[in-house]
Structures are given as C-alpha cells and as structure tokens.
Image (tube, coloured by chain):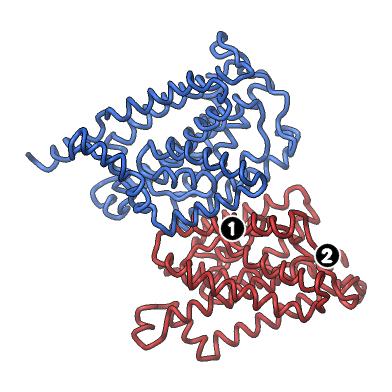
Chain colours: A red, B blue
Amino acid sequence: MTAILTNLFDGVAYGMLLFVLACGLAVTLGLMNFVNLAHGAFAMAGGYVCMVLVNRMGWPFFAALPLAFVSSAAIGIALERTLYRHLYTRSHLDQVLFTIGLTFMSVAAVDYIQGSSRVFINLPAALQGQFDLFGVGIGRYRLMIIVICGLLTIGLQMVLAKTRFGSRLRAAVDDPRAASGLGINVPQVFAFTFAFGCGLAGLGGALSAEILGLDPYFPLKFMIYFLIVVTVGGSSSITGPFLASLLLGIGDVAGKYYVPKMGPFVIYTMMIVILIWRPNGLFGRTAAR
Amino acid sequence: MSAASDVGYHAQRQARWHYGEFAFWLIVLACGFVFPSRYLIMTDILRLALFTMSLDLILGYAGIVSLGHAAFFGVGAYAAGLLALHGIINEPVLALIVAGLAAMVLGFATSFLVIRGVDLTRLMVTLGIALLLEALAERFSNITGGTDGLQGIEMQPIFGQIPFDMFGKAGFFYSLAVLFVLFLFARRVVHSPFGLSLRAIKNNPLRAAAIGIPVNRRLIAIYTLAAFYAGIAGALFTQTTAIASLDVFAFERSADLMLVLVIGGTGYLYGGLIGAVVFRMLQELFSTITPQYWQFWIGLVLVVIVLVGRQRLHRWVLYVPNLIIRQVAGRKAVVAVPESDA
C-alpha cells in the first residue's frame, strides 16, 4: 500500500515537472501552431546554466533557479526575434526541419562545451533524503518540485484568466486578425509568450537534472514526452496539458516500477491510441486551424 | 486539342527519358569501376538513396510528413537479418523481397493510422510507431539480440553464384542493381495516372476528392509502397554490412533522412539520389574536420536551408548548369525542380 502511495507521489512530482517543461510548448505548438521540436534545447540550456552557477561558482541552488529561467527566456526571445518569427507562416515540414536542425546544433554545442557525460547539480542538504509521512516515503526534493510547480500552475492559470495580458493572449490565439484589428500587438504578445515558455522550460530543466538526468542528449530524449503532453492534453486551456502531464508522469513511473520492460511501450501505445481516437487531444476543442 | 488530351500530352512528355538521365546512370555505373577502393561508402550512398526515394514517394508526391520512416527500414533490416541468421531463406534476393514484404505489411497496417488527421498528428503517429518498434525490439531481445544487435550473420552468394566479397564489390553492384530496378518501377508509378492523382491529392485533398479521386485509398497504396521500398533499403543494409542493431529504428535516422531529401529536393525521384551523395560527402567532410561534433554542422545546414528557402536554394544550384544547357540545347531543355511545399 505504502509503495503504491510513494509511487503515486513520485509520479505526481514527475508529472508536475513535465508540465513545467512542456507548457511553453503547449503555447507554441498548440496555440501558435508552430512545430517546435527544439523546445527541449531551451530546457537543457536552463539546466546547464543552473549547473554552472551552483557547481562552479558556488551560488546557492535557489538563487540559481531564477537565473536559469531568465537565461532560457533571453535565449528564447533572441531566437524568436531573429529566426523563429520568419517561420510562423511556413509549412510544417519547414518548421520541423528548422527545429531539428537547432536541436542537433544545441546537442553538439553542449557536448563540445560541457562534455557528453551526465551532470549533477549540488543540492543543499535540506533538499536531500526523504522523510516518512504516515509510513509513506516522501522525497524532500520531489516535495519541493510539487510545491514550486503547483504554485507556478496556479499562477499561470490566474495570469491567463484574470489579467489583461491573459485576455490579450487568448484573443490573439483565438483570432489573430481580429485581435490585431482591435489594437493588440499580436507579434509582441506571441514573442513575450514564447520567451516566457522558454523560461519555464529552462526552470524545468534546472529542476529536472536530479530526476530526469541532464546530458547533451536531453532535447532528443525527452522531445517525445513534451510532444505527448501537448498533443494528448490539447491546447484549449492550461488544464489539458496539466492533466496530461500528470497522467504521463504517473503512468511512466508506475510502468517503470511494475512492468519495467514494457514501460515505454505502454506510453507510446497510449499516445497513438489517443491521437487516433481524439486527434485534437483528450481535452482539446474540435476546431483546428 | 481538348483539355484531356492536352494533359495527357504533357504528362507523356514529362515521362519520356531525358538525355541527362542516361548520363546520370552511366556515371553511377562508371563510379563502380573508377573508384574500386571506395565500394563501402558508395554502397552506403546507394542504400541511403533508395531509402530517401521511399520517403520522397510519400512526402514529395503525396505530401505525407513522416518523422518515423526508420520504422520500415528497421523492420526490413531485422527481417533480412533473421532470415539469414536462422537460414530460413538463404538466397539474398529472395530474402530481400521477403523483408520488403514484411515492411510492406507493417506499412499497410499503419497506413490507416497515418492517413487520419493533419500534419501534426501524422508527425506524432509516425514518430510514435518508430519509437514503439524500437521499444519492442529492445523488449524482445531474445529474438533481436537487444542492444547488441544481431550478430554472426553470414550471407550466402547471390543467386547461389556471386559471393559477397570483403571489399564490397559484389555488394555495391548488387545494391546498384536493386536501386535501378526499384527506380524504374518508381518512375513508372509516379508518371502513371496513379502518380498524377497523388500530386493532385498533395496540392489539395478536398478538390482531389471532388473530382473523383479516392483520396484515402490512394494514400494507403503509396504509403504501403513506400514502406516496401524502405524495407528493401533496410534489408540491403543488413545484407551488405552483416549487422542489424537497435539504431536502425533511431529517430536520428528518420531526421537525417529528411535532411537528405531536402538537400536533394522533394517531388522528383533524382532528389533522393542526389541528396544521398551530397549528404554523405558533407558528413565525410564534417567528420574529418570535427570527428565528434559533425552533428552541429549538419544541424546548421538544415537551419540554413530552411531560412534561405528550399526553392530559392535549388534555383541557385541549378543556375550554372541551366546556363550551359541553355547554350547547348536551347531554352526548352532547362532543368527545373518541380517543388512545392509539403
């Protein structure tokens, strides 16, 4: 019984992490209709920035996390302004080729700068180990992830639903032409959202070094997971990807624990079945652009 | 002249053999005699060319974007490997066809999943199928050899006559013959009314359906055929290298394949062949400069190609040859790449 609960806890932490990593992609892929296979590269960038700051320069872990966010967002906005924005109107094939190219470049570049082995971030002692809660083993680090990611999710939902920027973004997504007719600067809204999504990915990358493992092949290894979150979750709201991430996280942890050899098999089958059954995602709306 | 016969006239003109094509194949054949020390890499190029032609059939002609074409390559590779390893079919040509058919069956079965949905769903589903097969091959390691791959494959002589030699000479001419035969068939297919209907579907599926083309059935047919071609390419890989390992299913293989096709140009069969040559040359060049980081430069090539624009790039590449052709053979003979976005 307690093993099940521990697994569930780990699965939730894993799922939350996936959500933070992938929710930026939900915006670019789901809302802006841009196939960005290089999303994992931004996450990796954040992870490595955090690693360098903590391990080499001795920054405290919690001070390095915001910087991981900022640096990934900066890279994101630089690339968006210089390269990505030329490709919004191009075919999906062009977008796929372009972002695969970027991914390859990022993999080789990080390999060149930091070496190809897996890196670890030195964690403060307060985050190590686990404690027992009614007999259920709770990892401190995973608990922190759940707290941070849970707060982020609530914050995102609030921003999207309550603020002026949120309503602008929703308008720009629903109908870019009408939105720009109403005086909303659509490219600017998209650029800002893109950068914010990249920043979240960077933060997720920094947090995931301990759980998913951080090496130069991170963008390729986890690309499929991010895509699953977005395609299965749909893009009509932030809740869809969130639930999909939780499902994927719990399913993956449980799969690895109970049927270790069939783990990836189960997930890929699930994804294909869901895509065939509901091409717009489990929680998606039917209108597709 | 009525519209129908006019279309037929142009289609026939397009389908006629061009002088350049004869020259192309003669050069390829001549390479086999001129560079006897480079058989291995040339065989590799031929295999890649066949594999790319397979992707071109679905991407360039029918407009199906696939990120998991390595699935069929892998099935062909493992099928050929298992047939040879267990001595089920010893004759390589027969084994080749059977391996191709195995991939074809998979292609037919999965085509129903692929024809549904838009580009994005197709990308995900094809990618998912390739990953699924990779996971399966890893799971059933007692059959596939797991991460070690199939080892100890020994190929019997072709038709019982021509043994595979260690310099790869037999392998090269065998691959060339297979490529040429399959090329002839593909050429016939794409210039047939069937091939023309595929282009109609690619340009606008809704209109194609409106003029009476059974869109789904045509897509299933071409997807199945492309799977057969990819399976043959995979089987050639196993037969000429005598190994089959998990990386035949790898995502990188599908991604590289797209790059090859894009370098060569989509929508005409020579695109795959030219792309394969250029890609391997680039890869050789990059790996002599930086053995470990050649992927960076490959990625850069992809980014630049997309940013410059594929159509513009091919116009530039063809600028000088066309200038010469125009002087020699007049304005009509100019080579143009029939390209439109997938």
SS under mark 2: helix
Residue A103, numbered label: 1
Marks 1/2 in contact by CB < 8 Å: the verdict is no
Q: Position of residue A72 (x, y in %)?
A: 63, 73
The numbered mark 2 sits on a residue in which chain? A
A11 shown above or below A126: above
Residue A4, numbered label: 2
Q: Residue furthest left?
A: B1
* Residue at the image point whose x is 44% and y is 83% from the top: A171
Using the image as rendered, state which of residue B109 and residue B70 is in the foreground. B70
A105 horizontally vs A183: left or right: right
Q: Residue furthest top?
A: B161
Using the image as rendered, state which of residue B203 and residue B107 is in the foreground. B203
* Residue at the image point whose x is 37% and y is 83% from the top: A180
SS under mark 1: helix
Q: Amino acid at mark 2?
A: Ile
B193 horizontally vs B255: left or right: left
Residue A61's image quarter?
A: bottom right
Are tags 1 and 2 found on a single chain? yes
Q: Position of residue A71 (x, y in %)?
A: 65, 75
* Residue at the image point whose x is 25% and y is 47% from the top: B212
- Neighbour class for label 1 at 10 Å: few (<14), some, many (≥20)? many
Using the image as rendered, state which of residue B258 and residue B35 is in the foreground. B35
- Neighbour class for label 2 at 10 Å: few (<14), some, many (≥20)? few
Q: Disc 1 or 2, which lies upstream in sequence?
A: 2
